[in-house]
Image (tube, rainbow, N blue to C red):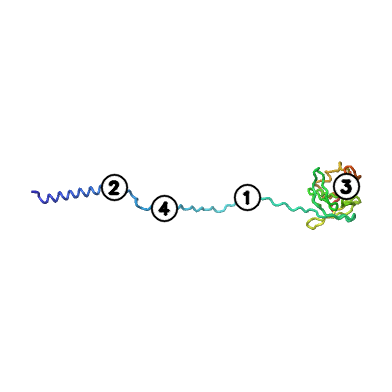
Amino acid sequence: MTVPWRRDAVLALVLAVAGVALVLVWWAARPPAGVGRVAAPPAAPVAATAVEPPPASSPFPTVTARPAAPAPPAPVLAPEGISLAAQRISAPVVDVGVDDRGLLEVPRDGDDVGWYRWSAVPGEPGTAVFAGHVDTLRDGPGAFFPLEDTQVGDRISVSLVDGSVREFAVTGRASFPKRTLPVDTVFRRGGPPQLVLVTCSGPFDEETRSYEENLVVTADPVR
């Protein structure tokens, strides 16, 4: 015969053992910490605020920046007209260069005068060179036909594209064989301002259909 209190004690012990076993099983099978939670996004980095030091006095002067592009060149005051009152010469001026032989060009129209575009601007340092026909087969007497009559002191007026007029006075006149033309004098790039007028002169060569000499008239600015 089983004693009732012993049976109850055994039952309580069995239940206690079973509870401890359940606790151990749950502890072993539990999920790791954090499972099932929504992870918070990482915090945005906080930009560091730079603290500027107080301005210090510099031993160097302040330099103002300049544009890197070069300044556009100044427009050239090209001549547009020339006149010699004493010889009744008044002619428009056109730009000329050199021909295929390296010789100074002369305008196609006998009534025009050519300004050598790589010579000086009239009144600026160097020589301003003008060339004109003494005559042409088509037009007859050219713009510089009366040039051989110039005298020292005669006035020459040159008008520029800006409307200004520059005055010169003749200082000399001479003829040179074309092969001995003093190029260094006629085409002088520096030195005092001077005007040089060039045309053909001397005997006419029928074979070459050209004059054998050049007439050179020089003039200085009127102060």
The residue that label 1 is drawn on is 60
Instruction: Judge depth for marks 2 and 3 and give the one in front.
Output: 3
Q: Residue furthest bottom?
A: 163
Q: Which comes sooner in the sequence, label 1 or label 4?
A: 4
Q: Which comes sooner in the sequence, label 3 or label 1?
A: 1
Q: CA distance from mark 2 to mark 1?
A: 76 Å
Asked if residue 31 can be seen in this view, the reply is: yes
Determine the residue positioned at 68% across, 50% down.
70
**As drawn, is 94 to the left or to the right of 213?**
left
Identify which amino acid the numbered label 1 is placed on. Phe
The residue that label 4 is drawn on is 41
CA neighbours of label 1 inside 10 A, class few (<14), some (14 to 19), many (20+): few
Given contact means CB atoms under 8 Å apart, are the residues at marks 4 and 3 in contact? no
Q: Residue furthest left?
A: 1
Determine the residue positioned at 57% across, 53% down.
55
Identify which amino acid the numbered label 4 is placed on. Pro
- Of 99 and 116, the residue lying toward us: 99
Task: Indicate the secondary structure of the residue bearing disc 2.
Answer: helix
Task: Indicate the secondary structure of the residue bearing disc 3.
Answer: strand
Instruction: Judge depth for marks 4 and 3 and give the one in front.
Output: 3
Q: CA distance from mark 1 to mark 4?
A: 51 Å
Residue 155 sits in quarter: bottom right
The residue that label 3 is drawn on is 200
Asked if residue 125 can be seen in this view, the reply is: no
Q: Which comes sooner in the sequence, label 4 or label 3?
A: 4
Q: CA distance from mark 3 to mark 1?
A: 64 Å
Q: Which comes sooner in the sequence, label 2 or label 1?
A: 2
Which quarter of the image is occupied by the C terminus? bottom right
The residue that label 2 is drawn on is 29
Q: How far from the left and from the top, in percent, is residue 86?
A: 90, 55
